[in-house]
Amino acid sequence: MSDLLQYLVSGLAVGCGFALLASGLVTVHRVSGTVNFAQGMFAVVAGLAAGSFLSAGLPHGVAEVAAVTAAGAVGLLTGLVATGKPGTGPRAALIITLGLGFVAYAVEIMVWGDGPRSHPGLGGTIQVAGAYVQRQHLLVIAATALVFTALGLFFSRTYLGKALSAAASNPYAARAVGMNVTRMGLAAFALGGVLGGTAGVLLTPMLPISFNSDVLLITNGFAAAILGGLNRPGLALAGALTLGVAEALVAGYLDASYQTVVALVLMLAIMIWQASRRTALDMEAAR
Amino acid sequence: MSHLLRSPGTLAALVVAAVAAAMPVLLPPSQVPVYVLLLLAAIVVTGLSLLMGYGGQVSLGQASFYMIGGYSAALLAVHGLPTWVALLAAPVIATAAAALIGVPLLRLRGHHLAFATLAVQLILLSLAGRQEWAGGDIGLQGIPQLEVAGYEFADDVSYAYLALAALAVVVLIARNVVDSRPGRGLRALATSEVAAESSGVPVAGYKLAVFSLSAGFAGLAGGVYAFFIGYVAPGSFPVLLSFEYVVMVVVGGTGTIWGALAGATVITLLLQLLNNIGTMEGMPAAAPSVLSYAVYGLLLVLAMLFMPQGLVRGLAFSSRLEVRWGTWKTISSRSAKRRRSSA
């Protein structure tokens, strides 16, 4: 029973990381229509940078915030390259973000080497109902709850947030009332960078990451986001938590090496089920 | 026949074929393995170009079929089947596998399909590493030499000619598919599935067919690879390999056979050059990987931004070839215009 609780908490914590990644994907996709393959890269950059800032002597908190800010800047840069040139369609943008991921590999290997790295998080465990729960896991869950609340307030209460939602729901009307939809897309990319970066600094103490961890991070983030059709942050959160818990249970009770297989099969099943309910006509009318 | 010879496209093809056939003998022996790998990449990329360029479907997991081909050939040969049977089985098994997983997978479009194909490869890699009969993470070793009708393929040059023959077959098939009625149907469904369907194109069938065909090409290349290297393991077929094929297709230009060949050649040569630079004395140990990642990334980004039609059509490398691909230009410029106006 205490095993189960432990798996549940660690699964929820990992799922929260996926949820942050997925919410970044959703934010960018809603506004710009682009699936950002570099979303996992933001997390890797922030995770690795946080480690460097910490070993350079910055205190906890400051180092993480600096790393997340850096990820936001990388996000903005990614957006500029991927959507800045007029006439770049969503499919081209997907391939461009894939290419930017490669460029990031080169930079990451130069700066941080090619081995997996980690940085110390919140150490220690506390006892809850007979189970030992790592404090870092609780921190990740709390931070994610905070971020999602802030995100909800941002989209419903602030001017920029409302403008982003408007540009997402009807770009034509948004442009007609004088909004710069391209700039909104860039803002979404920067926000995506911040969200991905937050996931990176929170996840790195739990799972050491190396430059090529981004493929697994992005597939898990995509798997979570796809539940809400890449457009609904709430469903993405639900998907991510399910995914995290499912992976933790598979790793705990069956075999750790099957946990990604479970996640991927789940993602394929969801996508195929969704596709069976949408015809080609729907897809092309939505373009 | 005489009018065929006068056509500049055929002439160019003959020249390229002659140069390609002379290469294994002309190259220094240490470079022949690179040439073999280049040819194998060209085989996979020709298929992927058909799928991406003509069929309009993105695959980020094409190396899975290369892997299926390689493992099929290796397993059959290790278990005592005649090696030529194992080689022939490789594309057949890869095609069958693609036809099987294609049925559910090809309901997906665009980035969904891209992630689904990536997921398939990650699943395959994870599973192959766990199976004892497939050698686990260590892989299958001791694959016997390929033997066809008493001739043993023992040296690199013989594999270069084998790969060349395979590439010739693949290019011929691809060319005939492109020029056929199904080829026109494919091009139509790449632009609009609804329009194609209402004009009587069996969309689902054609998509599955081109997916399986491109998988078969990759499987054939994988089979040759298994015999050439003599060893297969999950590590031989990383996700990065799939991305590499996409880079080759995009750099060469989707939807032309010339583009696929040019893309595979340019990228392989460039990587080899960078590898030579990176391993020179005084370079840090990480230099080769840093250089190759940087170049992959920059090429992919720059090609997508500034040369979306690819090297071959982008550089218009021969004005005479442009005549042959003239129909192509009008189609692509028309669709580019449409894209601009809808953006």
Image (cartoon, helix red, strand yellow):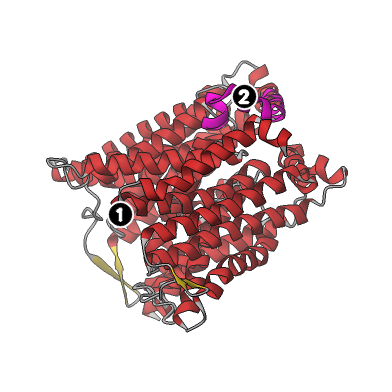
Q: Position of residue A165 (x, y in %)?
A: 59, 32
Label 1 sits on what residue type? Ile
**How many neighbours does mark 2 have within 10 angstroms: few (below 14), some (14-19), or many (20 or more)?**
some
**Placement of A23 over or under B251, stated as above or below:** below
Asked whether disc 1 touches disc 2, contact meaning CB atoms under 8 Å apart, the reply is no
Pick the front one: B328 or B245 = B328
**Residue B70 in view (yes/no):** yes
Indicate left or right for B184 with B274 as reference: right
Magenta: main secondary structure: helix
Q: Secondary structure at mark 1?
A: loop
Protein chain holding label 1: A
- The residues colored magenta run B309-337
* Mark 1, residue position: A209
Q: Residue B266, image x and y in percent?
A: 43, 38
Residue A16 appears in view: no
Secondary structure, mark 2, is helix
Identify the residue at horizontal 66%, vertical 67% (top origin).
B100
Q: Is residue B305 left or right of residue B171?
A: left
Q: Quadrant of residue A53?
A: top left
Residue topped by disc 2: B320
10 Å crowding of disc 1: few (<14), some (14-19), many (20+)? many
Query: Residue sitting at 77 percent across and 48 percent down?
Result: B182
